[in-house]
Amino acid sequence: MQKILIVDDVEVNRELLRGILKEDYEIEMAENGRQAIRKLWEYHDEISAVLLDLQMPDIDGFKVIAEMKEQGFMDRIALLIISSEHAVEVEIQCFQLGASDFIHKPFEASIVKNRVRNTIELFRCKNQLEQKVEEQAAALERQSQIIRIQAERLSREKPFHNLMMEYRAVIMEIETRLKVLNAVFSEEYNRNPFESIKSRLKTPESIYKKLERKGHPALIENISAYIADVAGLRVICSFPDDIYRLAELLIKQDDIILLKRKDYIQKPKRNGYRSLHLILNVPIFLPDEKKYRKAEVQFRTIAMDFWASLEHKLKYKKDYDDTDDIERQLKDCADSIEALDYQMQEIRDKIYGSNG
């Protein structure tokens, strides 16, 4: 049987509660706050709940609560206040101090039984859930440590360094070709089709995680075989039609091979994300050979990139409640940004003419 500690300086109240609860619980009683604290120290591993009176001489209920909080007992023991006090402010204060429920005097047997049973059950479920969360967090941390160790081992291998050098060469190759196209546009149309290029190489840890998700061992040969975005570039354009024009000119070059195309501009993701993604096979020229390596190139307008960057930050901020409303607002913003992109493009056409 679960053990309950009843704390009240009035003997008749203690006996009434004992009579109501003795069939379902093992009862301990304390006639003052000092005795309550002593019994908490003695039985805290066995006690499931404390029924605590507030008004007691010497050490009152609030001092008992303070001691329970200081010793960490309230993390493991449910606290129910028993009081003849009916002021809402007192109840609010007790809940703010960590009480689970409030039982008013005089006692009604069915109310006492139900509130004690429900509180203990809810507290037990809460503690079980917290324990599972802690166990899962510990398991994730162990997994993360394994990934870090394996990724560090991978990054120390010379073949890995050589492969990363080749992917850096892919980035430089694509950047050079895009800059040449930009220069041609600047000469011919007196404007530039893109504003900036951002590039990145996946970290060893990110590479290891992706191979693991795909079910492949973390071997050097599997990186180039199964991961298409080790080398990634993001091209930020001024207008939507610049995206398609620039992408088309890039993939028309006879030594670049288009492997995959995902157009999230014509068909945005459900959350409103818009971008043109190309997976390319790109030649690199090494001292003694020519090789092809894959790269992912994303094309966005300035507005698309602004939205995607903020959405990414907000997506990983989890301490908000109304997820559906946030997602709806983000989708509305994406729709507004799309309209703005095409409106600005229309203004540009009026200024530069249809050949702009």
Image (tube, rainbow, N blue to C red):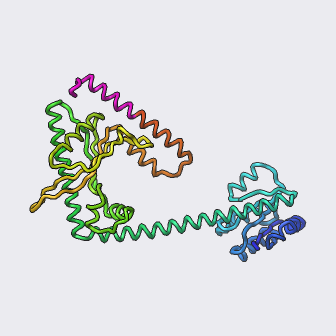
**Residue at (48%, 69%) from the top-left corner?**
139
Looking at the rendering, the stretch of residues picked out in magenta corresponds to 337-356
Specify the farthest residue to the left: 288
For residue 145, what is the image quadrant? bottom left
Return the x and y of residue 79 as percentages of the image width and height. 73, 63
Q: Position of residue 312 (x, y in %)?
A: 41, 48
Report the quarter where the N terminus lies: bottom right
Quarter of the rendering containing residue 53: bottom right
Q: Can you say whether 104 is above or below 301 in the image?
A: below
Residue found at x 25% / y 66%: 221
Magenta span: predominant SS is helix
Provide residue 18's location: percent of width, then percent of height: 85, 69
Q: How many marks?
A: 0
Give me the residue at 30% from left, 25% from top.
Answer: 347
Residue 147 visible in rendering: yes
Say if the magenta span includes residue 342. Answer: yes
The spot of residue 329 in percent (x, y) is 49, 38
Decide whether residue 232 is among the magenta residues: no
Question: Which residue is rendered at x = 29% and y = 46% of the image?
Answer: 261
Which one is in front, 66 or 19? 19
Camera-side residue: 299 or 148? Answer: 299
Residue 302 figure quarter: top left
> Left or right: where does residue 278 sit relative to residue 18?
left
Q: Say whether residue 305 is visible.
A: no
Q: For the C terminus, which image quadrant?
A: top left
Residue 12 placement, left or right of 183: right
Task: Identify which residue, 76 or 72, lies in the foreground.
Answer: 76
The single residue placed furthest to the right in the displayed view is 12
